[in-house]
Image (tube, rainbow, N blue to C red):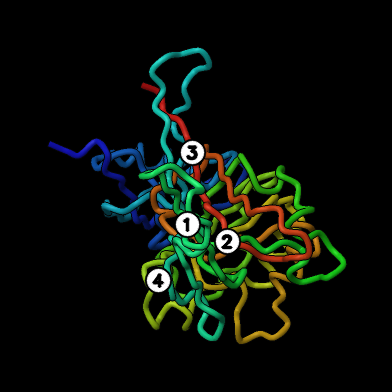
Amino acid sequence: MSDPAAQYRAELDFEITFSNGGSLRGEGFRIDIAGSGPTEDELGAALIADLGLLMADRVEIRRYQILSERHKRAAPPPRAVPGTSGAALHRADLSHPIEQGMVTIPGLPAPRIMADSVSAQLPPGQYAPGVQFAIGEITLCGNTGTYVDSPFHRYPDRADLAALPLDRLAELDGVLIDVTGAAARAIGRAPFIPYRVEGKAVLVRTGWDRHWGTGAYAGEHPFLTAEAAAHLVRSGARLVGIDASNIDDTRDPQRPVHSQLLAAGIPVCEHLTNLGELPGSGFRFSAVPPRVAGFGTFPVRAYATWETAP
């Protein structure tokens, strides 16, 4: 019996001819498909839909194989009809927990957490016998765990955390760009082209969060290119996040991605995790830091929510 939750992709060699002339050939091309046993006619239809082709007349599938793989461009999940009871609400926590002494970026201070330091200093008799509260304190660098960069992080005359509007941080329509398995570290413009990102939180899943807590995490991590950042600015993205240790290539002292996104007022959320739990779209994303005046970066509890019909 097949697993109804399994996802499949097809790898194709094909030739498409068009009714208005011309043809298109491809080898080793992969597309998302609905099941494990499509016919060649169904594969041809899925290929045309995936590429968004007009005037396609004939599709010849010359070779194909079906692969059990997660969809790269997942369709929006079924949404509950307004007013319909029984819709399932899903939540995914996308942030790393902050722990005593943890290392986020080598060389930056680790957090110091004192759970009862304040309550221990309260005068006797403050509370009735047996009544106690944990009132602690924490010292941490703004770049700790999963955090949001405001424009002030890069430009001292731009919006700080206190000035960031909630419509840049909370309950944003989200889209997931899944580039797991890419051979190159640099993520250019091409993976973003098929998606409408205007007004959305654009979350880039690289799978690099698997290295969190290891020495490899700060090493040869994936990053966006300046070309990708320019495309996201032009396309009207509202927030951009990534599950790696930096959205920029840390070997580039110009930091072009931070520079372009933050100049456009687009917050950056780094060190995300668990992006594999998300659907490709149809979710809402939130990553809200406290309103700290005169500060550029601070940890967040990043999460996503989405609904599926009963």
Q: Secondary structure at mark 4?
A: loop
Marked residue nearer the N-terminal end (3 or 4): 4
The answer to whether residue 59 is visible is no
Label 1 near label 2: C-beta < 8 Å?
Answer: yes
Please tell me which residue is depicted at 41% across the width and 36% down the height of the picture. 90
Direction from residue 72 to residue 140 in the image, left or right: right
Q: Which mark is residue 299?
A: 2
Between circles 2 and 1, the one closer to the viewer is 2
Marked residue nearer the N-terminal end (4 or 2): 4
Marked residue nearer the N-terminal end (2 or 3): 2
Q: Quadrant of residue 262?
A: bottom right
Direction from residue 82 to residue 212 in the image, left or right: left
The residue where tag 1 is placed is 95
**From mark 4 to mark 1, how far is it between C-alphas?**
11 Å
Q: Position of residue 158 (x, y in %)?
A: 84, 63
Pointer 2 local density, CA inside 10 Å: few below 14, some 14–19, many at least 20: many
The N terminus appears in which quarter of the rendering?
top left
Q: Position of residue 287 (x, y in %)?
A: 59, 51
